[in-house]
Image (cartoon, rainbow, N blue to C red):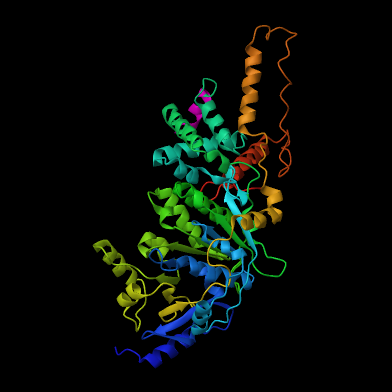
Amino acid sequence: MAKNTPEQQVEKISSGYTFEGGAITLGAALVDGEVHPEAQVRLPLKMMNRHGLVAGATGTGKTITLQVMAEQLSNAGVPVFLADVKGDLTGLSTPGISSEKLLARTQSVGMEWKAASFPVDYYSLGGSGEGIPVRATVSSFGPVLLARIMELNETQESSLLLVFHYADQKDLELYDLKDLRAVIQHLTSDEGKADLAELGGLSSATAGVLLRELVALEAKGMEKFFGEPEFDTTKLLRIADDGRGVLSCLELPSLLQQPLVFSTFLIWLLADLFEELPEVGDADKPKLVFFLDEAHLLFNDASKAFMDSITNTVRLIRSKGVGVFFITQTPKDVPGEILGQLANRVQHALRAFTPDDAKALKATVSTFPTSDYDLNEALTQAGTGEAVVVVMNEKGAPTPVAWTRMWSPTSNMGASPAETVKQVADASPLMQEYGTAVDRESAFEVLAARTTARDAAASPGAGSGTADTGPAPQERRPSASRPPAKQDNPVMDFAMQAAGLLGKELMRGMFGPRRRRR
């Protein structure tokens, strides 16, 4: 099949990236080494919940591409979540600096550049940094994600699931790590032997392993990431007073030594959003676009349960109006069952220095439709700030492949000063809500009180008629969600108790987190 002439190729790209609805602009097409500002390469807002991939070798411009996309999404009224692994994206809250070189480049790609800052909320995991603290309760985090952080095998993961099941049944709230530790200690104690036997699939030896792994987790300082107030993930959907989408930037530079922690917390945010958001159907623009940086860390040594859960979450969350973009070096970093769901591709340059690099290049080329470009050449010779692009058009078909020179950010390319980040974070109304940790009564306190009461009852004189053994057990009040069972209807009483237990089990989603009752 004969290739198009350069003029035909430019026309094909220009018409292929012209859409009726709203869109963000990625850049201008390059054909035969010449940039064509009349052939603007765009991405339809309507199709951004079909997910995407931003890939490329280190130093090829992936972070700048994220910044360009985030700015335009904000201007379109779409909130954005970004994981800032290296601290480069803090520049979003500071206007960019004009220069002769910058203006010459932006003019060449048909961009009218004007310095701007954007509404940003800076976050940090557990308050480890200047941003608004993001915490999760252990119960909400769930056993599958916690098992990944604890690096448990599949047998131990199943045992941890039984511990969560036990805590649910006994109304032992798991807010922080000491709550989970207290439950496991109870199950391995003499008093908890009967409860441990009831669980069946949990041996005392495995419970001891879980306890040791949990203590090791606390020794690494992980306890600050769990607790209350738990972050409400729907806060990521905030719109600023001027109608622009708020950019939620989670700072992670201090967590590069703990990749499992940060990558797993990102998945918790996504899974919790899936559980909380309603179905929206087809919309003109997404409710949120979620950028997952260093995506390869999500899948390294992942258990089957984790992989199944993340695959289903990505597949189904688009119906909630959320688009997910994975950022990594090559498409090979993303499992095939997830890669097949990523309809929008922005592929920066790859390097082919080793046989493994050559294999990765060949695999990447195979993921693109047939085009007029020599993709082996394009993907190895693209300069910094250039990428090969293919997206889904408004009819659900792929656009023509376009070697693209990307637009430039209008905010600062690089980190903002630390004092600026702190000022922005402190000024957010969310800092008042999440800035200070709280410690409510939960499993740790309940089990400690039971131990104290039991020790008091066993002390000398406890059996005499004058000994004070504490208040008499109070009758459990009926749940507000259902009326009390009638005493003269034992069948109904049994049915309602069973329904209550089933309801509690159904509160746990794909990763095993228990949904919050708002």
- Residue 4 as seen in the image, left or right of residue 110: left
Figure quadrant of the N terminus: bottom left
Q: Most extreme residue toward the front, as rendered?
A: 100
- Estimate the x, y position of residue 346 in percent, counting from the top left: 44, 71
Decide whether the magenta segment is chiefly helix, strand or loop: helix
* Residues rendered magenta in the picture: 193-202
Q: How many marks?
A: 0
Relative vertical location of residue 20 with respect to residue 355 in this rendering, above or below: below
Q: Nearer the viewer, residue 491 or 512?
A: 512
Q: Is residue 103 above or below residue 474?
A: below
Whether residue 198 is in magenta: the answer is yes
Q: Is residue 112 a member of the stretch shown in magenta?
A: no
Q: In the figure, 376 relative to 134: above or below?
A: below
The reply to whether residue 228 is in sight is yes
Taking 462 as reference, is 68 above or below it? below
The residue under the point 52% across, 57% down is 87
Report which quarter residue 114 is drawn in: bottom right
Query: How far across and how far down the image is residue 95, in percent?
Result: 61, 69
Evaluate whether residue 282 shows in this view. no
Residue 142 lies, in percent from the top left, at 53, 44
287 left or right of 144 in image: right
Residue that lies at the very extreme toward the left in this rendered image: 355
Looking at the picture, how far across and down is residue 133, in whole percent? 62, 48
- Name the one closer to the observer, 93 or 475: 93
